[in-house]
Amino acid sequence: MKAVVYKEPFSVAVEDVEDPRIEDPTDAVIRITSTAICGSDLHMYEGRTDAEPGIVFGHENMGVVEAVGSGVASVKEGDRVVLPFNVACGFCRNCEARQTAFCLTVNPGYAGGAYGYVGMGPYSGGQAEYLRVPFADFNALQLPPGDEHEADFAMLADIFPTGYHATEMAEVKPGDTVAVYGAGPVGLMAAYSAMLRGAERVFCVDKVASRLSLAEEIGAIPVNFAETDPVEFIVDQTEGLGSDKGIDAVGYQATVSGGDEEQPAIVLNQLVGTVRHTGLIGTVGLYLSSDPGAPSDEAKQGRLLLEMGRFFEKGLRMGTGQANAKKYNKELRDLIVAGRARPSFVVSKELPLDDAPDAYRRFDNREEGYSKVVLHP
């Protein structure tokens, strides 16, 4: 089959690789119909991880079941399904607590597994024609048959649950003011989720005009940090108190205004300044414990200078970590089916799998029109 294979920093290729097969009785094999490129894929693409050449990328996957193992009970051939990016067993202590991002079974020696991502277990990615799905009864979310809502349902694999997870950690409730730093796909999903949860006002901070325009289209207040201090602006707009809740959808590759210099802790510290006393922060932006491309020796080891004193003085609380996608995806699926949610508004391009190398290059360059790319094998 054809698949997107990592070659070296800033280089992927579509190559022939071995077809997946049923390896365990609880496995399924699906034919991929949609698979998306994620911002976290760029960390491997740019050579900022220890990903080995040959890894098949892709953790945002959906398709149709082609085969099931003898131990699969609820999923059957022909089912249309979407896969949470978290590979999880369903029966360990963390999975039973709905903390599927931290499954204790699927990746020995580490809590959590994922498709097509370095350090997240031996699971090939789905930017390919076919994909092996372990623990299929637990991991495969069944969808209505046909091809309706294809792009919407594809967002259930990662970014919609991840954005929603940010609002869950921040405990966004009706009437809240929410500051979302980052208007990429995850940040937009966080802003969208905050509004679904009844937030009164949502501020979206970024510097990319097309992203800010999209934020405004869904009802958020765009804040261009290249033109104004976002902390001062949001505090001023909230009667000097600060927002009730804050969300970090940027992570360690944050940059400062006026250039491309990375300051890995800047968004966390801006949120400390933005969120009111006793407020909550949800952090879904990725922070790595090892980043050879970081701007300082400390940052290369995941050690950041957080304004902990101010954080403590304000009585702030913060939730962090990868989203437990399965915790939310069924309910979010039902919102899509009911016409209450349309997460595909973030999709900027739908392309054939063969166009993946060019799409990666353009996405990495932040070219307009390549903010969220869905590939169709």
Image (tube, grey):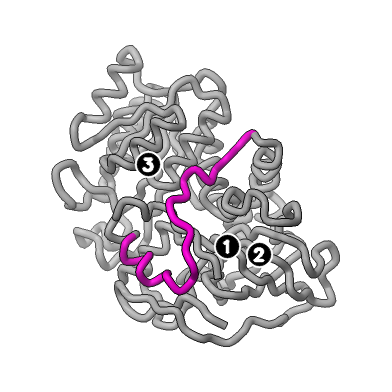
Badge 2 is on which residue? 63
Q: Is residue 119 visible?
A: no
Classify the position of the N terminus by image quarter: bottom right
Residue 308, image x, y percentages: 31, 37
- Of labels 2 and 1, earlier in sequence is 1
Residue 35, image x, y percentages: 54, 63
Q: What kind of residue is marked 2?
A: Gly
Q: Are marks 2 and 1 in contact (CB under 8 Å)?
A: yes
Give the number of the disc on residue 183: 3
Residue 142, image x, y percentages: 74, 56
Q: Which residue appears at 73% of the width and 66% of the height?
A: 136
Q: What kind of residue is marked 1?
A: Ser
Q: What kind of residue is marked 3?
A: Ala
Q: Nearer the viewer, residue 196 or 366?
A: 366
Q: Nearer the viewer, residue 350 or 18?
A: 350
Q: Is residue 355 magenta?
A: yes
Q: CA distance from mark 3 to mark 1?
A: 23 Å
